[in-house]
Image (cartoon, helix red, strand yellow):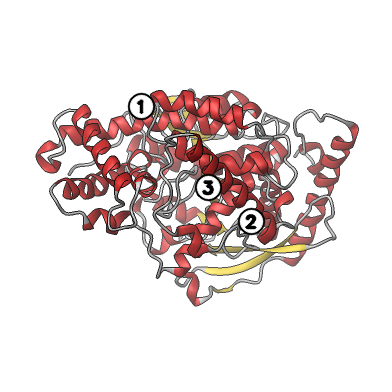
Amino acid sequence: MRENKPKSRLLALSSAGALVTATLIAGAVTAPAASADSRHGQDREALGAATAADRAAKAGIDWQDCPADWGLEKPIQCGWVSVPLDYAKPNGKQIKLAVDRIGNTGTKQERQGALIYNPGGPGGSGLRFPRRVTTKSALWTNTAKAYDFVGFDPRGVGHSAPISCIDPQEFVKAPKADPVPRDEADKRAQRKLAREYAEGCAERSGAMLPHMTTPNTARDLDVIRAALGEKKLNYLGVSYGTYLGAVYGTLFPGHIRRMIVDSVVDPARENIWYQANLNQDIAFERRWKDWQYWVAANDAAFHLGTTRAAVQEQWLKLRAAAAKSPLGGVVGPAELISFFQSAPYYDSSWVPVATAFSKYVAGDTQALVDAAAPDLSDTAGNISAENGNAVYTAVECADAKWPTSWQTWDRDNTRLHKDYPFMTWANAWMNLPCATWPAKQQNPVEVGTHKGLPPVLIVQSTRDAATPYEGAVSLHQRFKGSRLITEEGAGSHGVTGLVNPCVNERVDAYLLTGELDSSDVTCAPHATPKP
C-alpha cells in the first residue's frame, strides 16, 4: 500500500498520498503453531526482538541533518537503527533501517511522545511523514503540537538494505504485454515472466527473502520504538500499514499507547494474501464504476458520454486501440490500466485521469502518453519503483503459503474476469511470482487481542477498492475495545488524509486525549471532486 504509486505499478495495497506484551515473550503470541519446533522458533524470535530492543534502547539514534538527496528539509533529522536480519539470531547479521523525525511543534509540556507512520505497500517509505509539519498540512496541525512525527523505510525499502528483483530500467520499459490473455500462449508467456521475476529476486536479493515478512517488520517497529526512547508506541498505519499494525498489536499488545489504522487489510489468516488480491479485483470494479458514473454526470466538462455505459464504451475503444497499436509506441493496455487505476484508488485522481482521457477522445493523444508512459530518464524514480515492487512481492510471497498449481490461479482469475475485468488479470500476473517463490513461505499470524492491548481506532470508507470494507469489520471484531469510524458512501483510499471534519476531529481527539466515542460512528462522505 504505497504512498505514491509509480506509473509502472500494476497494483499494490497503496495508501492515500494527499495511503504496528504484557511482557515481550508473553506478548509474542502468534497463531497456534503446527509443531513444537515452530513454537520454539517463535519463542526464539520473541527473545531476539527483546534482545534487539534492549540494545537499541541503550544505543539510541544519532540524529543528523538528512542527506541532501533524500529530499527532507530542515529541521527534519535522519538517523539509523540496527536490527537483526533474522530475529532467531539476534547477534547475527544486522541491517540498518533509515528513520527520520521532526520534533513536536508545541511546548515540552504538550509533548506526548513519538507518532510513527507507515503508508502501506508493502514497499512504501514513511520518510515523508515529517513533511506534514514542514509543509504545514492543516489536518495535522493539532497532532504535531503533541507528537514528534517519525517515519522510516521498512526493511528492504529505500535506504534500509534495499532489495531488487530486476534491472530498474528493464522493469519500467514499455509497452508491456496486454494483461488480458487472448489464448493459452499469452498465459504461458506471462507465467514465464512471473517465474523469471521470482528467479531474479533470488539472484539479486536471495539472502533477504526469507526474512522479508510482516512479523519481522513489526519486530523492527518495536526496535525503533526502543531506539526512540519510547516506552510505548503511538502508531498510524494506512493500507498495508494496517496489517503491520494488526500484527504489531498481536505480538506486542502491551507496547502500544495509541494506534490508528486507516483503510484496513482483512487480517484473517485465510485472506493473507491470495484471497486478499481476489477480493481487491471485485472492489476495484465497483469503484471504477463509481468513477465512470461521476464522469458521465460531468459530461459537460469531459465529453465522454452521459451514461456510465457510454464512458465504459470509450474506455473499451481506447483499450482496443492501444492493444492494436500502443499510443506513442509505449502506452499499451498494461500502461493504461496502471494509469487509470489511480482513479478507483484516490478521488484526487478523478479529475486528472478524466482530463487526460477526455483530451485523447478529442484527438490529443500526447496528454495520455505523457501521463501513462514511463520516464526512462528518471533513473532515481525507476530505481524506487522497482524496489517498491520487489518489496511488495517479497513480503506478500513470504508472509503466507500461495497456491502452487497454475490450475487454481487460472480457474479463479478466469471466473473473476468475466464480471470484474478492469483489474483481475493485471493483478494476477503481478502476484504470480508467489506461485514459484524461491524462499520459505510462512504461516500468517493469528491476529487477535492479548493482554495489554489498548483501544484501537479503525477508520474505513465503505467503497474502498484496495482494502474492501470487510477488512475493517474483521479487525474490529478481533481487536476488543476498538472503535470503527465508517465513511459511508465514499471510497478514496486513506481516509485520514482527506478533509472530513467528522473523521478529522475524532482522529485529533483520540491522539490528543485518548478519547473515543462510546460506540461506532458513521460519517457522511467527504466532498466529491469538482471538474
Camera-near label (1 vs 2) is 2
- Element marked by disc 1: loop
Residue where numbered disc 3 is placed: 121
Please give left or right for residue 216 compared with residue 505 in the image.
right
Q: Position of residue 269 (x, y in %)?
A: 66, 29
Residue at screen point 33% across, 38% down? 501
Task: Pick whichever, 234 or 361, lies toward us.
Answer: 361
Task: Pick whichever, 419 or 455, lies toward us.
Answer: 419
Give the Cα distance between marks 1 and 2. Answer: 43 Å
Q: If the image is split into quadrants, where does the C terminus sit?
A: top left
Res. 488 mark: 1
- Element marked by disc 3: loop
Residue where numbered disc 2 is placed: 200
The amino acid sitting under disc 3 is: Gly
Give the Cα distance between marks 1 and 3. Answer: 24 Å
Res. 120 mark: none
Q: Badge 2: how crowded within 10 Å, few (<14), some, or many (20+)?
A: some
Residue at screen point 53% across, 52% down? 389
The amino acid sitting under disc 1 is: Glu
